[in-house]
Amino acid sequence: MSAVAFVVRRLVFYVVAGWAALTVNFFIPRLMPGNPVETMMAKFPELQPQAQRALEAEFGARHDGSLIHQYGQYVVDVFHGNLGVSVIEYPAKVSSIIGATLPWTLTLVGVATIVSFALGTGLGILAAWRRGGWLDRVLPALTFLQGIPYFFLALLVVDAFAVHLGWFPIQQGYSPGLVPGWHWPFVQSALYHSVLPALTIVVTSMAGWMLQMRNVMITTIGEDYVLAAQAKGLSSRRVVTTYAARNAILPNLSGFALSLGFVISGALLMEIVFSYPGIGLTLYNAVTSDDYPLMQGIFLIIALAVLLANLVADAVYVLADPRARAGRSET
Amino acid sequence: MTVALPVRGARARGATRRAAGARRLSTKARIGALICALFVVAAIVGPMVAPYDPSAQSFAPVDILHAPSMAHLLGTTARGEDVLSQVLVGLRATLVLGLLTGLIATVLAVVVGISAGFLGGFWDELLSLLSNVFLVLPALPLLVVLIGYLPQRGQTSTILVLSLLGWPWGARVIRAQTLTLRGRDFVAASRETGERTWRVIFFEILPNEVSLIAASFVSTVLYAIGTSVALAFIGLTNFSQWSLGLILYWAQNGNALQLNAWWWFAPAGLCVALLGTGLVLLNFGIDEIGNPRLREAAGRVRIEGRAWRPADPTPVVRSGSTRSPAARPEAR
Amino acid sequence: MPVEPVLEISELSVAYRGAAGDVRAVERVSLSLRPGEVVGLAGESGSGKSTLAYGACRLLRPPAVITGGSVTYRGRRLAGRSVEVLERTPPELRELRWREIAIVFQSAMNALNPVLRVRDQLLDVVEAHLSLTKLDARERVASLLDLVAIPRDRLRSYPHELSGGMRQRVMIAMALAVDPEVVIMDEPTTALDVVVQREILGQIVELKQRLGFAVLFITHDLSLLLELADRIAVMYAGQLVEVASAHAVHHGPAHPYTKGLLNSFPSLRGPRRELAGIPGSPPDLRSLPAGCPFVPRCGFATDECTKVDMVLRAVPGARDPGHVSACPFVAPGAQAPDGKGTVSEVAS
């Protein structure tokens, strides 16, 4: 089996997973007790009758056509990018709301995750290579970070650096009053506002990567081929990188893909604490105001984004591990 | 020598090894176990020793948002409720939720994992596909949507939903281990002698996966507590029952941060953090028992006063070495 | 003609340091290797033979510690100088390793880097030790595969794509990559089936004759050494119990343990006899008895044996002048009291 075949097999899996996400999304409102449309109508009495009919169609409360028919319509709608209409921001389309807020989350979370993965992995390699060194002794303190919920650390960080020290803004993605766009004052403000949120993500997730990498590295260093590399008289650098780290990072890589789901969760909570205008905050607002169409649309987009990221990570893994190309997957 | 001997030998050796390992846990693992034990005790006695009713409100100005004092050891909330009582009562609910979810999810994980690993073939493909799909979908958004639709957001439904999403991690790991064990000689030997499948699973495979299952349980409890607190923080919880997450929700809603009422959110948050750390350290201990290599290294070898790196050449220490217990006669 | 040994291990002691004290894995072992010679190191698992070899190269990881002795290397490239391996600094050791002393590991599947192609694993050691142009280096690597009769297109393969025998041959090629003087072979054929084993051994002999390196062949299978080695050293519980020429070991072993080992495998020729083996199990290095460690399993043991000092002494009446044994009580060809000590075979 070649690399292409492996990727194709994974692609099929992701298509199945994507279909599962779609279907779950479709069935949740129909399986839950209660009538979501009535809830919404009660909350927003000013909604027009057309809105009510549209909502009913969306949630199947009207029962026109069989379930299969509704499902088919739903899938077609999704592929056209029609995710319905938001209730709290009526008549704004769900897709446009998501389009406005998703980039904020993507940049912040994307950059922060990559940085924490790189840092954590690098430090893990160092800690394992210099067993008993100061890095190894600092590890217990870092496990403390692993057990702290993201958002609590965010709260503490905001309290310390923003409220007390006033070094960074307390919340928001940019200074109110600025118009979003690609001009320097705005970009600068955006960057300034993203420091604390990014920092919390990096600090909390870095510990996990570091510990994992350290443990795998310790096992890898005990392998015969690392000993053989030393026996060959190769430089320490080559032994650490090409022989030890290159092998040790493989489980971490596959773990990275799987942990993306958790990263998203943490980022969502962090956005709530910082009132950062990303998709997490939007989801929160949707939940508190029972805006079901928006909630569902966001879930679907997040799910599909995570699946896509996983696919990319899998492709990277195939490039990294020649055994995977032979069809022998370690996962 | 009958075929049965190696089978029992492998089992016995494994058990002895593990027992010996338990006695030599590193400090951090012991700290973890201690922390968890303390929290369990606190959860059991908490509601009984709480000084006030956690929901008892008071709007007298002197009682609102008061810093810690003799009357209220952890201060009061914006509605005059006693924070200490809330924490003591809420701890039990959070811990119970975590433990129950851990139990259900771990049982599911063990059943699915061992079935997939042991039966192989079609069942393995199916179960693996199922767990992988659950794994890859992002948990929190899915939970938000699921619970968001539930009219009642009580403990039971939360436990069920969390368990539903929490079993795949453990199932994957257990499946991998079962696959490895299935290929081992002692399992093959017992199957050759005609031992029935369920006996093979219970007496050969399960005992060798105990530390893995324990670690999986602890991780799931950690995940359950963290996620339930997060959900409560967003407001997706049962408002009539106090939990650590609910305290944080009210604190956030009451702008505790901006008002500098640190005593409102710090205790609950610290409890979650400490409990989380305790669980993580406990897991370290379980890992160390299962993987001796990590443990040896935990003893941090110091020879001639400095720690040695794996890449260093074997040290040469010529001064008199410590003698092993049975002293040997001095050679010529 | 007395030739200076190329590798001389003298009174080497290696211990594993733990909280409960040291476990002496190798106790005052002296062994020397002459240029072009094949010395076999035989013993059960846990006898310390691999520890001895890796310890001499300082490749053992903590908590292993070298507690005494010296290791002197005198290769041709050093032009008369000698090198004390135990006193080298890490950069000096790196120069010594592979270029002078190379190792063929036991399990090629584990000793080859799974994520590197064969070509890259061979190249990096060539580049680390020799300063060749890129082209010359590649040509050298390709010719290494020719040396072990592997087709050149395998250079692009990964270890998991090769068969067991091929992997082991790659290991051998890799060991010879930069022309070492000494090759330590740690059970190189144990994991292979008999037919492949034969091929590999034949290859090793042929390469040794062609390139002239010395071999330290470690194995638990004494029968292999009887054919392959010039001299054989037998270890038990971390100590040498007998050293002699292969012929002497085969036809007149002096130490009861060696006799026992020879009795543990059948021969294709000669009269049928009952396989005796050695009763009991290997000793626990943490609690060795006083005197000779083999006493609990020895058919010749007497009370005197607990006072033996385990020094290797010349065997009286031996044909081979270098034949030494740690047992002062038993003569070559002697039988154990229960009559199961005979070792003489009808020679071909």
Image (spheres, grey):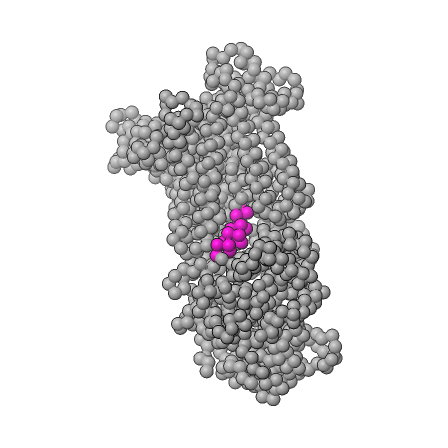
* Range drawn in magenta: A236-251
User: In this orientation, which residue lies closer to the viewer: C348 or A274?
Assistant: C348
Q: Is residue C131 left or right of residue B239?
A: right
Residue sitting at 58 percent across and 74 percent down?
C35
Q: Is residue C162 left or right of residue B17?
A: right
Residue sitting at 44 percent across and 75 percent down?
B327
Main secondary structure along the magenta-highlighted residues: helix
At which x and y percent is residue B222? 46, 41
Is residue A66 placed above or below B270 in the rendered structure? above
User: In this orientation, which residue lies closer to the viewer: A214 or C19?
Assistant: A214
Residue sitting at 50 percent across and 75 percent down?
C80
Q: Which of the 4 image quarters holds residue C149?
A: bottom right
At which x and y percent is residue C130? 54, 61
Q: Which quadrant does the C terminus of chain A fall into? A: top right
At which x and y percent is residue B321? 41, 71
Is residue C89 placed above or below B177 in the rendered structure? below
Is residue A275 placed above or below B107 in the rendered structure? above
Is residue C192 placed above or below B135 in the rendered structure? below
* Residue A237 colored in magenta in the image: yes
In this view, the residue farthest toward the top is A49
Q: Which of the 4 image quarters holds residue C320?
A: bottom right
